[in-house]
Image (spheres, grey):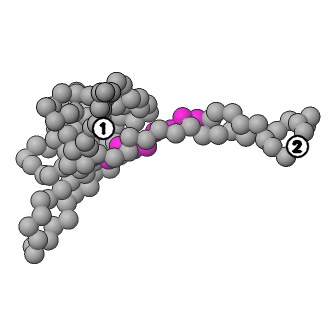
Amino acid sequence: MADRKDPFRGFNFRLEMKGVTEAGFRECSGLDASTDVAEYREGKDQGNFPRKLTGLNKHANLTLKRGIDPDNKLWDWYKKVVAGKPERQDGSILLCDETGDEKVRWNFKQAWPTKMTGPTLNATSNDVAIEGVEIVCEELEREK
């Protein structure tokens, strides 16, 4: 009988970065990478079909959301961008199994926050106040 390998669940993840200690987030998106296609034709090419070459590699912005707490490190990091002195950092998003052991890691490089989002406040609701950060990165790779 073959070993059964179930996929990992998406709820057990954390952020690792120097200087930013927030580990628990409610949501993470933007672990996307793509490569542009460069098309060209030469005069001697037969037919109506262009040649296709690889172009620029691109990575989506990472978006992280969490419940607001007294820790202000993400906003402090963003304030450096507003002041014209962005502090670029490398970091990782870790996906863990049910026991908390790391199973998959996405490493990002040269990242800085491009957007902070405050919560929607509503006096008739008892939802948790959620804030978000959007992080730009120059490289993204999956490890493990």
- What's the residue at 13%, 52% (across, down)? 68
From the top left corner, tell me how far across and down residue 13 is, in percent.
22, 38
User: How much space separates mark 2 and mark 1, taking CA atoms?
Assistant: 45 Å
| Extreme residue in the front direction | 1
- Residue type, mark 2 in image: Gly
- What's the residue at 12%, 59% (across, down)? 128
- Quadrant of the rendered image containing residue 105: top left
Mark 1 residue element: loop
- What's the residue at 26%, 32% (across, down)? 94
- What's the residue at 90%, 39% (across, down)? 46
Q: In the image shown, does 56 or 86 lie closer to the viewer?
A: 56
From the top left corner, tell me how far across and down residue 34 is, in percent.
52, 39
From the top left corner, tell me how far across and down residue 21 is, in percent.
16, 33
Q: In the image shown, does 96 or 21 lie closer to the viewer?
A: 96
Q: Which residue is mark 2?
A: 47
Q: Is residue 143 left or right of residue 78?
A: right
- Residue type, mark 1 in image: Pro
- Quadrant of the rendered image containing residue 144: top left
Q: Which residue is mark 1?
A: 7
Nearer to us of marks 2 and 1 is 1
Q: Residues within 10 Å of mark 2 (few under 14, many from 20)?
A: few
Magenta highlight range: 56-64
Q: Is 61 a magenta residue?
A: yes
Q: In the image shown, does 103 or 6 lie closer to the viewer?
A: 6
